[in-house]
Amino acid sequence: MSSPMLPRERAEYSAIVDRPPLKLPDGARVAVWTIVNLETWDISRAMPRQVLTPPMGQPLLPDVPNWGWHEYGMRVGVWRFFELFRELGVQCSAAVNGKMLEDYPRIARGIKEAGWEFLPHGYEQMPMHKVEDQPAAIRRTMDVIEGITGSRPVGWLAPGMTQTLETMDHLAAAGIKYTGDFVHDDEPSTIKTVHGPMVTVPYTFDMNDITIMALQHHEGKHFYERGVDQFEQLYKEGEKRAKIMAIPIHAYISGQPHRFVHLERLYRFLKRPGVVFMSGAEIYEWYKKTAPQMA
Amino acid sequence: MPMQPRERLAYSAIEGRPKLKFPDGVRMVIWPVLALEEWDISRPMARMVISPPQGQPMLPDHPNWSWHEYGMRVGFWRMKKMLERVGATPTVTLNARVCETYPQVVQACVDAGWELNAHGYEQIPMHKLDDQRASIIKSMDMIEKFSGKRPRGWFGPGLTQTFDTLDYLSEAGVEYIGDWVLDDEPVTLKTAHKPVVALPYNFEIHDIVLMALQHHPSDMMYVRAMDQFNCLYAESAERPKVMAIACHPYLSGVPHRIGHVERTFKEVLSKPGVVSWNGAQILDWYLAQTK
């Protein structure tokens, strides 16, 4: 078997100024793509993220404090999201570990009732590099979702956005049409796999609560401030070409009361003319229709 | 034995040093530096915005590769328009390999008349190169071939250098570096060949340090730069001051930061006697002063 493609071979360099502009539906300037990440954290392993290290700093198992920190998001935080986004009519993609749907059927029901997209987020919350059988894990995650919704999911967002050089080919073979794992643009793009083209929908680390809060340790209000800055620049540029603003959030981070107030403030700010709230699947469908030569 | 930094440059207090003088009408110089890099997917990424779940670094590191790539696809073009709006003329310091991997970007810099400065071949520390001398010559040659002009300046990747690096740089034709952040004025460094001038660069008004390492909010570029500027501007009544502002497209070129970078340049360049010069201009002024 020949060696897998490198990212540069899948996604040739392209300068945004050299591409014809895309246009959003109904004259909108910015499409806001909200991704609610919902995971399951296995108590037998190291936790994916930590808010608190143990006394003397050495990681210990089981890590109950950080497990409980995440569990708060599932018991309490996510229900704040459901209520806010229902009130504002914000369409979301729920990025879900397959196993999360099995471990938390109550949340699976909540997502279904909210009418959000089910976006596969790996079977468990660990890097794809550590998954022994990637095709099986991808298929299993899609099967669990199909069991709930009755249809095959079209998108993929990897745990921690990780991928090996082969992952995109496995995803295409499994029938995945778009991925959020390339944060390389403001617009969707089409990349190569050995099983045909794949669309990238622009995700970001710049408006991601893991990056802003858990890794960079900003204050709660910085999420709002950065969100306004991000939006105003994209809105200005959105006069000439379609702009996608991704906002990836996690229930255990943005679902905390002291942060949720700023998240709510940001969404009330974003709810204005010229802005549409779309799921990843809706952005993919729009891109396929608008730029058929590219998709 | 190569020279130690102290042997290349004797200690000197800024107090009591003979004064340099800017041309009439110039009181202070802003030196914008824009860095363009090549991040090789086969190695750990130069910087990381996200660590993988459970924290252990993994290769390939696609998320962070793709984070940097945004700067080249989108961020650079946004920054280029911004720099042109505010009338800032940057020194573009680039990994020579960028000429091959992102020729559109380098061509746009050449077309804009921006100075090209060599930033190594790829974004890895000088300490890790098997043959520094060959790598430096290759970098200088590649940029000269692409642009028709041999770069006069150099920034080490991550500002790194070993004790020998300056001798190789001088031999390859480098006239100035930005790697020594030890003064407000240019200084002349001894090498085994011709002397090399160290221009006053800094790690303070620098988006990697501010944003990627110290994790400040987006507006801190503006807040800190204005504090820095106000101090230097006041002192520039007495002696010439240079203030470098260092930007990377994957950091300063993202939507939530660009506005703060723009108002920084706009505000400092609007003050009487403040001009934007590139590295070569600062070098030529300094050489004429010290002749």
Image (cartoon, rainbow, N blue to C red):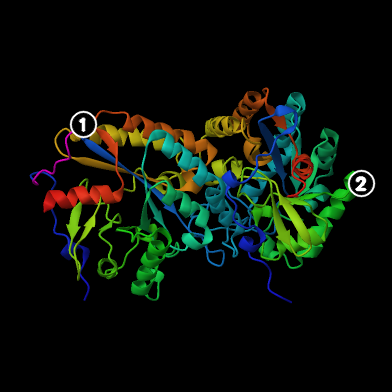
Please tell me how crowded label 1 is: few (under 14), some (14-19), or many (20+) other residues with Cα within 10 Å: few
Query: Residue at (53%, 52%) from the top-left corner?
Result: B68
User: What chain does mark 2 sit on?
Assistant: A
**Residue B143: horizontal and vertical position, in percent?**
40, 62
On-image quarter of the N terminus of chain B: bottom left
Left or right of B112: which side holds A239? right
Disc 2 on helix, strand or loop?
Answer: loop
Q: CA distance from mark 2 to mark 1?
A: 69 Å
The image's mark for residue B234 is 1
Q: Is residue B189 above or below residue B163?
A: above
Instruction: Quickly name the residue at label 2.
Output: A150
- Residue situated in front as seen by the camera: A38 or A290: A290
**Residue B285: horizontal and vertical position, in percent?**
20, 47
Q: Which residues are magenta?
A: B17-25
Query: Residue at (83%, 56%) from the top-left corner?
Result: A175
Q: Is residue A94 above or below residue B122?
A: above
On-image quarter of the C terminus of chain B: bottom left
Please tell me how crowded label 2 is: few (under 14), some (14-19), or many (20+) other residues with Cα within 10 Å: few
Number of marks in the rendered image: 2
User: What chain does mark 1 sit on?
Assistant: B
- Residue situated in front as seen by the camera: B68 or A187: A187
**Residue A249: horizontal and vertical position, in percent?**
66, 40
Decide whether residue B99 is among the magenta residues.
no
- Residue situated in front as seen by the camera: B156 or A27: A27
Mainly helix, strand or loop, the magenta region? loop
Is any atom of residue A144 visible in this view? yes
Which amino acid type is marked by label 2? Gly
Decide whether residue B24 is among the magenta residues.
yes
